[in-house]
Image (tube, rainbow, N blue to C red):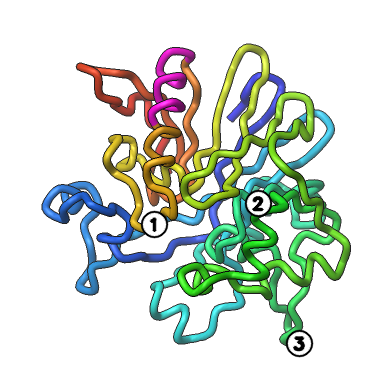
């Protein structure tokens, strides 16, 4: 869609599934299954929806999907269905991976940074976006290359070490405006160094929510993922962002909802309610 002087596109790298209990934390299944019905393995369907921002000067990707590097066991465990791929999604916009100037990784978990690299026909892993600088929080990089027992399964070094080897990484610490109207904001909660993108153009504002509010179902304050390392910080960040979004009419952009890509939130009886949804 047109967004002020920009274009923004919620594009797709397909779908996958994660355990519904883990996705909704302390919320009982009897509540979350009404909007997110699980399969026979208790997994719910999730989208892989990176954001493409086209400014007058740059083409910017926020997160990169999952890519093609998963083996049969991995793809079966997470019911990976890459239809369409990120390359196919870009092609629908008459673009290719070579057109991307900047990648913002909200963090380096495999469902957000997996598409930083791809396996070619010869089995070699190489950067997906050959021209793009990848902007990553310095603390997140350090956590990813030296994970602990809890976080190790979330990081696959083949997702990010090849872009270090090709000198395509810029490490930052905190906020940074990377293009007029596109600002990186650090929001701890999901992990310590999670970051996201705020977009501002001609009095319009949008925020890419990433894993802070992964689906439209997570708008409700208590709906916080069991994956979050600092859930109380997630709660405070959610409340702050949702209240500002309601007051200032921000566009909320969801990364993992399989249907609802964007929407506006309103407060009703003190509770956030999603209005004006933009669906797949």
Label 2 or label 3, whichever comes before in sequence order:
2
- Indicate the quadrant where residue 246 lies: top left
Q: Could you give the CA–CA distance between mark 2 and mark 1, rounded to whole angstroms?
A: 19 Å
Decide: is 186 above or below 69: above
The stretch in magenta equals: 239-248
What residue is rendered at 50% in x and 39% in y? 209
- Identity of the residue drawn at 51% across and 46% down: 210
Q: Decide if residue 176 is on the left or right side of residue 250.
A: right
**Front residue of 56 and 28:** 28
Which label sits in the foreground, 2 or 3? Answer: 2
- The residue carrying mark 1 is 46
Q: How busy is the neighbourhood of tag 1: few (under 14 within 10 Å), some, or many (20 plus)?
A: many
Q: Secondary structure at mark 3?
A: loop
10 Å crowding of disc 3: few (<14), some (14-19), many (20+): few
Say whether disc 3 or disc 1 marks the residue closer to the N-terminus.
1
Image quarter where the N terminus lies is: top right
In the rendered image, residue 185 lying in the magenta stretch gets the answer no
Residue 264 x/y as whole percent: 41, 24
Q: Please tell me how many numbered marks the rendered image carries.
A: 3
State whether residue 94 is above or below residue 146.
Answer: above
Spatial distance from mark 2 to mark 3, Cα to Cα?
A: 27 Å
Point out the image quarter for the C terminus: top left
Type of secondary structure dominating the magenta stretch: helix
Tell me: residue 210, above or below residue 8: below
Q: Nearer the viewer, mark 3 or mark 1?
A: 1
Q: Residues within 10 Å of mark 2 (few under 14, many from 20)?
A: many
Q: Quadrant of residue 21?
A: bottom left
Residue sitting at the far right: 167
Name the residue that disc number 2 marks: 105
Task: Using residue 31 as the reference point, say whether residue 72 is left or right of it.
Answer: right
Q: Quadrant of residue 242?
A: top left
């Amino acid at each position: 869609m047109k967004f002020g002087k920009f274009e923004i596109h919620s594009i797709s790298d397909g779908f996958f599934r994660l355990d519904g209990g883990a996705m909704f934390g302390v919320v009982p299944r009897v509540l979350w299954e009404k909007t997110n019905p699980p399969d026979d393995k208790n997994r719910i369907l999730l989208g892989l929806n990176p954001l493409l921002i086209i400014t007058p000067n740059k083409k910017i990707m926020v997160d990169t999907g999952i890519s093609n590097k998963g083996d049969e066991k991995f793809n079966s465990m997470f019911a990976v269905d890459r239809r369409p791929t990120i390359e196919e999604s870009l092609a629908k916009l008459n673009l290719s991976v070579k057109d991307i100037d900047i990648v913002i990784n909200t963090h380096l978990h495999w469902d957000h940074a997996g598409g930083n690299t791809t396996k070619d026909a010869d089995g070699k892993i190489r950067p997906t976006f050959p021209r793009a600088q990848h902007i990553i929080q310095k603390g997140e990089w350090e956590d990813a290359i030296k994970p602990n027992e809890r976080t190790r399964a979330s990081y696959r070094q083949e997702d990010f070490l090849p872009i270090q080897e090709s000198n395509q990484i810029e490490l930052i610490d905190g906020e940074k405006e990377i293009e007029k109207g596109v600002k990186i904001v650090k929001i701890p909660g999901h992990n310590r160094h999670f970051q996201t993108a705020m977009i501002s153009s001609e009095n319009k504002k949008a925020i890419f929510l990433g894993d802070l509010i992964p689906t439209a179902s997570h708008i409700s304050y208590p709906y916080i993922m069991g994956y979050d390392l600092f859930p109380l910080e997630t709660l405070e960040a959610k409340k702050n962002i949702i209240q500002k979004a309601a007051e200032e009419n921000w566009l909320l952009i969801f990364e993992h909802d399989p249907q609802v890509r964007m929407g506006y939130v309103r407060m009703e009886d003190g509770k956030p309610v999603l209005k004006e949804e933009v669906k797949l």
